[in-house]
Amino acid sequence: VTAEYPVDHPEFNDGTAEHQMQSLIDLITAVRNIRNEANAPLSSPIDMLIQTDNSTLKEIFESNRDYIDRFCHTKELQIGSDIQAPKLSMSAVITDATVFVPLAELVDLKDEQARVQKDVDKFESEVARSERKLANKRFVENAPDAVVDEEKKKQADYQSKLDAAKERLQQISSEM
């Protein structure tokens, strides 16, 4: 049995629905990234606050609350324009909104501080190793350009991770 190859029907494209779905995907991705950064398991329910002045976006999130609850495993969800960042929370900025996840009941501060300090130490040693490697003239002159470029990318990546870890450590220390 043969059939004609499917044809795109532009009249069926719905830009509004695509925008709404992308907003939900961005929100869920941001919250999951926060959970991952905070070492908070997906199985533990979280409080989530979304600050947005965009009424359309607020409507999208309100009408899709079930999906947000299911994919983010929320205990409490607040959406509004007057929401302030809670103490000891992590945030993520998405298009026209900021998401806050309070961490007080998710993580033990002392354990989290020790974990982040370990990350800082690891990233500092990786940055130093990469700097030594790039400072070695024999390596830079003899290695293929692709290898040197890859090492520069690694160094930049480790440096950004180090900066983020130091910022997180500072945030935890100020909350203790």
Image (spheres, helix red, strand yellow):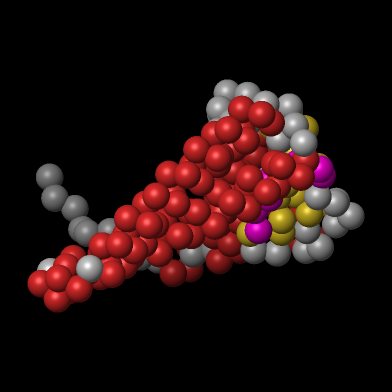
The x and y percentages for residue 132 are 30, 62
Magenta range is 86-93
User: Relative to the observer, which residue lies in front, 97 or 38?
Assistant: 38
Snapshot quadrant of residue 150: bottom left
User: Relative to the observer, which residue lies in front, 11 or 165?
Assistant: 165
Can residue 8 be spotted in the picture? yes
Give the number of callouts: 0
115 in magenta: no
Q: Give the dominant element type of the magenta stretch: helix, strand or loop.
A: strand
Residue pictured at 55% horizontal, 49% vertical: 165
Residue pictured at 76% horizontal, 45% vertical: 174
Quadrant in which the N terminus is drawn: top left
User: Relative to the observer, which residue lies in front, 119 or 157?
Assistant: 119
The x and y percentages for residue 156 are 40, 64
Q: Is residue 48 above or below residue 148?
A: above
The x and y percentages for residue 26 are 57, 53
Q: Is residue 64 above or below residue 69?
A: below
Snapshot quadrant of residue 81: bottom right
84 on left or right of 16: right
Quadrant in which the C terminus is drawn: top right
